[in-house]
Amino acid sequence: MRRGVALTVSGRVQGVGFRWMTKMVADQLKIAGFVTNLDNGDVYIEASGEEPALQEFIGAVKASPSPSGHVDHVSEQAIDPQPALSKFKIQ
């Protein structure tokens, strides 16, 4: 079953390759959506995918896909899956 999630990630997540590494994980797991930096230093992610892959993606984000990054907190909210999105993009 396909579902969507919005994640707001705080910690050392900007300037450490976090968005690029998040995209690499998303591409490997066939997750669609996007990742973007927020003005307050957080990173915002919208992701859609099949349940097992999406859970693995969320786990990778919580563990910080970037070796230089560090995640302090992840806020997770369910959203409608985005069928129009077929790839994962960095914004």
Image (spheres, rainbow, N blue to C red):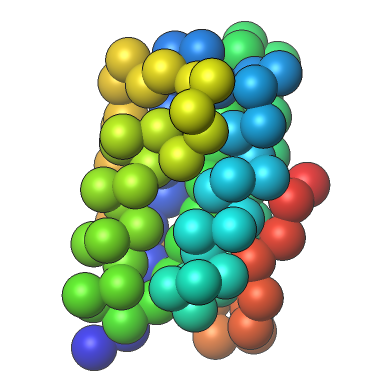
Q: Is residue 31 visible?
A: yes
Q: Between 24 and 78, which is closer to the camera in this rendering? A: 24
Q: Residue at x 50, y 72 (%)?
A: 28
- Locate residue 36, reporting x and y percent: 68, 39
In the rendered image, the quadrant that contains the N terminus is bottom left
Would residue 83 appear left or right of 2 to someone viewing this image? right
Which of the two residues, 19 or 49, is positioned nearer the viewer here?
19
Q: Residue 78: which quarter of the image?
A: bottom left
The answer to whether 86 is drawn above or below residue 43 in the figure is: below
The x and y percentages for residue 35 are 62, 47
In the rendered image, the vertical position of residue 46 relative to residue 49, given as above or below: above
**Numbered marks: total:** 0
Location of residue 60 in the rendering, given as x and y in whole percent from the top left corner: 34, 47
> Which residue is rendered at x = 29% and y = 42% of the image?
76
Q: Indicate the quadrant where residue 44 lies.
A: top right
Q: Residue at x 31, y 36 (%)?
A: 62
Rendered position, 84 above or below 63? below
Specify whether residue 42 is in view.
no
From this view, report whether residue 17 is shown above or below residue 84: above
- Which sits in the foreground, 66 or 31? 66
**Residue drawn at point x = 52 percent, y = 33 percent:** 66
Which residue in the rendered view is the most extreme toward the front? 67
